[in-house]
Image: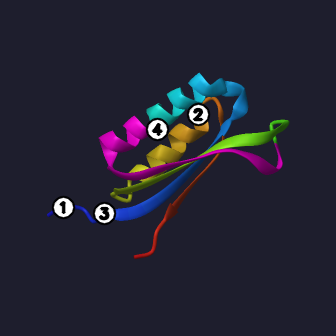
Amino acid sequence: MSEVKNSYEFVLVLSMKLGEEGIEEVTKKFQDLIESNATLGEVDKWGKRRLAYLINKESEGYYILFNFESTAVFPAELDRICKITDGVLRSLIVKKEV
């Protein structure tokens, strides 16, 4: 019997201090991570946006939205990796209601 898969939205806010190449690198890292552990759907790069408040003395961040389907175990691991990755200002993983 296979495990139940849920749909998730994952928003990543990256530091502008990474530069274009650094942002691409971190985006690719998370895209590869999701693809190897889940079914990756749409990846929507929102680009540079103003933050509602300063985070680490930064007023802008680079936003990326990932949609994916996975078992309930993977989002916790994804969140853990976000916390230890340099350049990640904020991340949010939300389970979509079907």
Q: Amino acid at mark 1?
A: Ser
Of discs 3 and 2, which sits in the foreground?
3
> Residue 72 sits in which quadrant?
bottom left
x 53%, y 47%: residue? 79
Of discs 3 and 4, which sits in the foreground?
4
First in sequence: mark 1 vs mark 4: 1
- Secondary structure mainly formed by the magenta segment: strand
Q: CA distance from mark 2 to mark 4?
A: 12 Å
The reply, left or right, for residue 84 in relation to residue 35 is: right
Does 3 sit above or below residue 85? Answer: below
Residue assigned mark 3: 5
- Asked if labels 1 and 3 touch by Cβ distance under 8 angstroms, the answer is no
First in sequence: mark 2 vs mark 4: 4
Does 25 sit above or below residue 40? Answer: above
State yes or no: residue 49 in magenta: yes
- Give the SS element for disc 2: helix
Residue assigned mark 1: 2
Q: Which residues are magenta?
A: 30-54
Q: Amino acid at mark 3?
A: Lys
> Residue 84 sits in which quadrant?
top right
Residue assigned mark 2: 84
The reply, left or right, for residue 68 in relation to residue 92 is: left
Where is residue 87? Give x, y as percent. 65, 31
